[in-house]
Image (cartoon, rainbow, N blue to C red):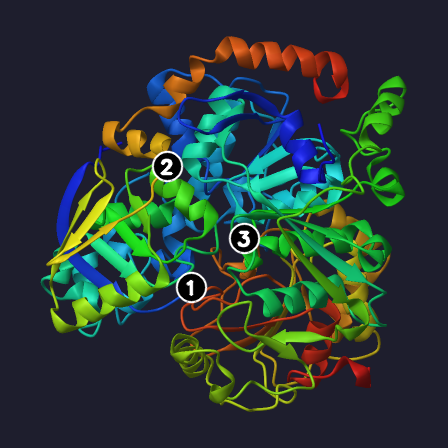
Amino acid sequence: MGAQTLYDKLWARHRVDELPDGSTLLYIDRHLLHEVTSPQAFSNLRLAGRKPWRLDTSLAMPDHNVPTLSREQGVEGVSDVIARQQIATLERNSREFGVPLFPLNDVRQGIVHVVGPEQGLTLPGTTLVCGDSHTATHGALAALAHGIGSSEVEHVLATQTLRSRKQKNFRIQVNNRLGLGVTAKDLALYIIGRIGTAGATGHAIEFCGEAIRALSMEARMTLCNMSIEAGARVGLVAYDDKTEAYVKGRPLAPCGAHWEQAITYWRTLHSDAEAQFDRELEIDAAEVRNQVSWGTSPEQVAVIDGRIPTLDQARDALQRADWERALRYMGLEPGQPLAGIPVDRIFIGSCTNARIEDLRAAAEVLRGRTVHERVRQALVVPGSGLVRLQAEREGLDRIFKAAGFEWRSPGCSMCLGMNADRLNPGERCAATSNRNFEGRQGKGGRTHLMSPAMAAAAAVMGELTNLGSF
Amino acid sequence: MQPLSEHEGVIIPFNRANIDTDLLLPKQYLKSLEACGFGDFLFDDERYLDPGEIDTPIASRRRNPACILNNPPWDKGSVMLAQANFGCGSSREHAVWALRDFGVRVVIAPSFGDIFRNNCFNNGVLPLQLAQQDVDTLFTIVQSQPGICAQISVSERRLRIGELELDFELEEGRRQRLLQGLDEIGETLAFADRIKAYENMRKAEEPWLFKG
């Protein structure tokens, strides 16, 4: 076998068989389940009289549709009747089928993509799937991880495999270091801005280079998380000392002799020097500056001290029409400077940016400052109960609350607005989440994507603002 | 899954790129525990002038007369035509269920979101990929002949619109799957021995991934 990419290695390792339909039967090591994309899968299993293939691979928890207030009573305390039914159904299904569950009032509950790595369920060298497109997050630990639909959730439950087709290899090499105050979120938005939301469709991205090595594990998760926003189901970072230090001691991580055996294997989880990629892109990290989205697609981004493009900068008539539509929806003008655009709400949270480092970065900006009077609501929604607890130990909750933020319980919250945390029509939000699609945070809501520190700065100024002044 | 072999239906044009799954089916409908009944909510934000929840009676909602899906003959259309990156965004299979429940069996576009594309095949919906110039040609035809039908033959991998005939690519395995409406899990379980053998190999080499 010749030189292989990391993706090639992970793929080959999990190949069970080639199927007559031209797909590959790929073994799945880990499966995260939540309340929104699993009920249909469990119903079908029940109808067909099937049982899960394995029980020690899965972990279920409600996250998409959970309230971020009044959580002490667990599912009984959920006032939205339909949401309560969905959460109760997940808990019932998990118990009936024997799938391990973190219920709503478990301190370990949180957003699946924050909890998986936190618990050590996500391990290097594994395949991990979830009925959620941001499953790419887990690739930061050199795991082959991607989102699947509900039919595939059922398939994985019943067979521990997926019928899969191999993606092409795309290497994004980020040279040099990111500048001070420039984060993985800025890098992710910058890359999506360059290659577009379909730029990596059909590919597995491997992020590498000095800037990636320098990123913390949590920052790597932020970057891999947004691979899907560039069209790639899979985003990967090679295993290194940071991965090892991060995984060690996690509740579900191997220990003792198994640990020694595991790290010997895990240390091979990188692309070979001579490995061939189908596509390559090189980026100079020093050129990346603080980004903010201005439109209704994550590719519609610009630097915070820049301007929205003018329509004559569009590459063709279709893109021009897209931009016009986006700006109409966003209530903005071509060529308008981004700094100074007033915001109504602030959302710090989501599987992209709700880990402890994200909360620290936002709190750092907010320390001794207050939310601008123009801002109607500023929410901080930690990614998991354990992140929340850690933040409270560090006193971050007090900084947020003193500044005028609401300190909430974990869940997806206003990233997709399935629960009560939503934008009203026309409201503008500085958000640390991952999608600025029309209606994403609420019908008619207007989303600007950015890093946690940038969102905190927007809260203080009541408008999109350059972090440089903080 | 309903098989799909020969299909004829009115083309519903959406001359836009990046139609995402949030647009196809907004989040409030993801609260359903079912895998059907989403047809009334397809393109909900554009289809209705008032906001809706999953339990809002459809008859009480104000339809947006400007939305093509509310107007004949497109309200009975079954072939959607759109621009690049159709179905990008979230993995919600509910977006495909909404298309299917509305009656859409074929979506024609220059490219699709990866997860959406997989979800289509699992629900008897054909994501029919054509070159950009062919898609542009179709838009020209549809513009001059609104309400025109397309005929799609999955068995012959051919699309016909009026005088125009186009062959399209479709992997053989997926073609068979659409033609026969197969139960994929049942087929995979025929490989149970292979899966078990593989699992035993992994258990020996990576015991930390297995409990007990």
Q: Is residue A446 above or below residue A152?
A: below
Q: Which residue is mark 2?
A: B171
Q: Amino acid at mark 3?
A: Pro
Q: Is residue A291 left or right of residue A423?
A: right
Mark 3 or 2, closer to the camera: 2
Residue at the spot 29% in from the left edge and 52% down from the top edge: B107
Q: Residues within 10 Å of mark 1 (few under 14, many from 20)?
A: many
Pinpoint residue A444: horizontal percent, then vertical percent: 41, 73
Cα distance in 3D space between marks 3 and 2: 43 Å
Pinpoint residue B30: horizontal percent, then vertical percent: 40, 49
Q: Which residue is mark 1?
A: B18
Q: Amino acid at mark 1?
A: Asn
Cα distance in 3D space between marks 1 and 3: 30 Å
> Tag count in the figure?
3
Q: Residue A185 sits in which quadrant? A: bottom right
Cα distance in 3D space between marks 1 and 2: 24 Å
Chain letter of the residue carrying label 2:
B
Q: Which residue is mark 3?
A: A67
Pinpoint residue A112: horizontal percent, then vertical percent: 62, 43
Q: Quadrant of the C terminus of chain B?
A: top right
Chain letter of the residue carrying label 1:
B
Q: Are marks 1 and 3 on the same chain?
A: no
Mark 1 or 2, closer to the camera: 2
What element does badge 2 sit on? loop
Residue at the spot 40% in from the left edge and 62% down from the top edge: B84
The answer to which of A126 and B33 lies nearer the viewer is: A126
The answer to which of A205 and A303 lies nearer the viewer is: A205
What element does badge 3 sit on? loop
Chain letter of the residue carrying label 3:
A
Q: Is residue A351 visible?
A: no
Does the CB distance between marks 1 and 2 fall below 8 Å?
no
Q: Are marks 1 and 2 on the same chain?
A: yes
